[in-house]
Image (spheres, grey):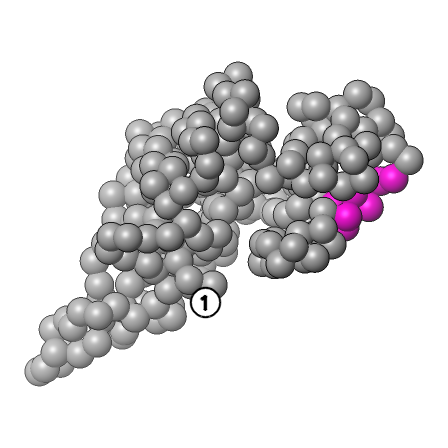
Amino acid sequence: MTGENEFYLNAPPFFDLSEIIEWIELQLIGSAEPTAQSMLDSIALLEEKLRDGSLRAYASIDTSPIRPIDQWNWAEFEIFPATPDGRAIRGPNRTRVDHFVVLSLKTYRAAALKDVSQRSDNQVPGLGALEPGYYRVMDQLVFLETNVRQVFPTDNVSVQAESLNDYAQALREIEGGRYFHSHAPHSKADVARMIYDHWKAQNRRPEKTLSTIQRNVSRHYDKFGEGGQ
């Protein structure tokens, strides 16, 4: 029997951090075109829901096993846009990115942490002298898809934002849009591969994995599908 705090990524379906931020941009921000500001607005809205307890995340903190994260934890952590190697992007004039990292607001001595993978620019008091400081890291964030849809429902989507969804747009571009409403005679995995290859040919979103694309393709057909098998 599994413990109540154990969490397995294969059941039930989940959103990862980049997916939920993209979902919020689509459903609530409704920007004419995704921008750095719409990304930051989406992060702020997500943090608001996490801090008021409307939405629960599951994550690893300091290399612990993935577990439910209580809302009080979000008093210490903040979500930042990040470089592909996971370094936080801070300051003004940010460009829109597809990577994110969750770090503590405070910095700590390395000896106080299990995970010292995210070094800060600050120094902290050590044994007789100052020493480099490190952020606590919240990693492998996931959100239950059913909860995400309750907190950020599709009823809020705008026609303009809907038309600019990356996955919907790709399906319009592939073979004249023949797979927009139905993936038949192909499987959803086949269509995900088509999108992956389409973006690769355009040199777009190389960091999106096939499993991420397939989950979003499934969500697309849940909304727009006509019963294709």
The image position of residue 135, as x and y in percent, is 29, 63
Type of the residue with mark 1: Asp
What residue is shown at x 56% (from left), y 27% (from top)? Answer: 162
* Residue 107 can be seen, yes or no: yes
Position of residue 142 relative to residue 155, above or below, is below
Residue pictured at 16% horizontal, 73% vertical = 123
Give the residue drawn at x 47%, y 63%. 84
Location of residue 143 in the rendering, given as x and y in whole percent from the top left corner: 51, 39
Residue lying at the far bottom in this picture: please name it. Answer: 128
Q: Quadrant of the N terminus?
A: top right
Name the residue nearer the viewer: 30 or 226.
30
- Total labels: the figure holds 1
The image position of residue 39, as x and y in percent, is: 39, 42
Which stretch is magenta? 186-194
Between 225 and 17, the residue placed more toward the observer is 225
Tell me where residue 119 sits by quadrant.
bottom left
Q: Quadrant of residue 37?
A: top left
Q: Is residue 98 above or below residue 228?
A: below
Direction from residue 199 to residue 124 in the image, left or right? left
Q: Residue furthest right?
A: 185
Q: Residues within 10 Å of mark 1 (few under 14, many from 20)?
A: few
| Residue 71 in view of the camera | no
Residue reaching furthest left?
Answer: 128
The secondary structure type at the circle numbered 1 is loop
In the rendered structure, the answer to whether residue 184 lies left or right of residue 212 reads right
Q: Residue furthest top?
A: 155
Q: Is residue 122 above or below residue 23?
A: below
Residue at 81% x, 40% y is: 175
Q: Which residue is mark 1?
A: 85
Is residue 41 magenta-colored?
no
Chief SS of the magenta region: helix
